[in-house]
Amino acid sequence: MAYLNTYADRAKKFINPSAKLLLETIERKQSNLCVSVDVTSSKEFLAIIDAVGPYVSLIKTHIDIIDDFEFSLIHRLQELSIKHNFLIFEDRKFADIGNTVALQYSSGVHRIATWAHITNAHPVPGPSIIKGLASVGLPLNRGLLLLAEMSTAGALARGPYTEDAVRMARDARDFVIGFIAQHRMEGVGLCEGQNPDEAEDFLILTPGVGLDATNDGLGQQYRTPEDAILGSGCDVIIVGRGIYGRPGNMDIDKVQRQSERYREAGWNAYLQRLKS
Ligand code: 5FU
């Protein structure tokens, strides 16, 4: 499976500013690693992000799991994003009607649209979910990922559902920048033989990546960065517990070493893909 273009070349083709910035950041930092920071204390959240910051292009949050959330945490997160030069992806997985998701995205305690460059949505309600989110996100230059597949055993998002997600994305290419998926879907993005000027492009961000485990005992399934980037044509690996282990008792030097290890594995797989 060959993809002829580099991240830098692809950055020039995207019209969405968040997609462009993500690709430029990946190229500059030589990192296609996104760390998913799934911890419940603000202190631990910020400590992990400061440790992994130099090695990532993207930080993924589940902001609603923070026990001691105050909006000032977002300001700290933004400071770290400037210090280490990464983008922010809130893994909110919106799944309601257009009017409701627009309110969930813009308002409430978290005001996600004001700080997350990227968020995501389940395609299950149909195209109106994109319309609702775009009404808030597009004026702010945000980008959306559709959940076309999931990493869990027995996931229902597959086959025709995945194909419909791709169709929905193609109809909203100003706002939908790509997918959460396990592989690059047939015909999606720049493939060998296509004219680069005519090809559409979508980013594939993939969770369920681990170098030391194959599952978590709760349905999560892991494969290696090489499987994800080289074997399955994904663009960004999303790694959580593979980097920081069990929250609560963290060795921050180890967290840093692990993030460098995943960065290197992801980048080497990309370099191999360019040559394949
Ligand atoms: F859409 C998905 C999916 O299909 N699988 C996932 O694991 C999202 N995720 C998220 O990626 C999940 O909610 C976690 O935040 C993260 C994976 O964390 P892990 O610790 O690497 O398993």
Image (cartoon, rainbow, N blue to C red):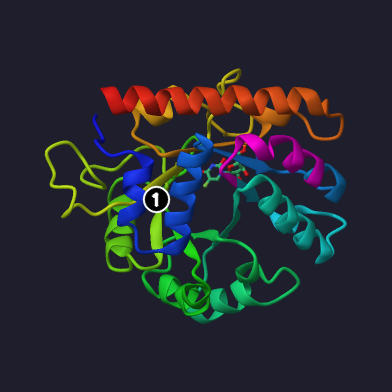
The region drawn magenta spans 46-58
Mark 1 close to ligand 1, CB under 8 Å: no
**Residue 109 in the image, given as x and y percentages of width and height:** 76, 72
Compared with residue 112, is residue 181 higher up or lower down, i.e. above or below? Answer: above
Residue 52 lies in the magenta stretch: yes
The image quadrant where one finds the N terminus is top left
For label 1, the SS is: loop
- Secondary structure mainly formed by the magenta segment: helix
**Residue 51 in the image, given as x and y percentages of width and height:** 75, 35
The image quadrant where one finds the C terminus is top left
Going by the numbered disc 1, the residue's amino acid type is Ala
Label 1 neighbour load within 10 Å: few <14, some 14-19, many 20+ = many
Q: Which residue is mark 1?
A: 148
Q: Indicate the quadrant where residue 75 lies.
A: bottom right
Q: Residue at x 54, y 38 (%)?
A: 29
Q: Nearer the viewer, residue 139 or 168?
A: 139
**Residue 173 in the image, given as x and y percentages of width and height:** 32, 65
Q: Is residue 105 left or right of residue 28?
A: right
Is residue 143 among what the camera can see? yes
**Residue 92 in the image, given as x and y percentages of width and height:** 60, 59
Compared with residue 45, is residue 166 higher up or lower down, i.e. above or below? Answer: below
Compared with residue 148, is residue 134 higher up or lower down, i.e. above or below? Answer: below
Compared with residue 40, is residue 90 higher up or lower down, i.e. above or below? Answer: below
Is residue 207 among what the camera can see? no
Q: Nearer the viewer, residue 57 or 136?
A: 57
Q: Residue at x 23, y 44 (%)?
A: 190
Residue 51 lies in the magenta stretch: yes
Q: Is residue 188 left or right of residue 44?
A: left
Can you tell me which quadrant of the image ligand 1 is in?
Answer: top right
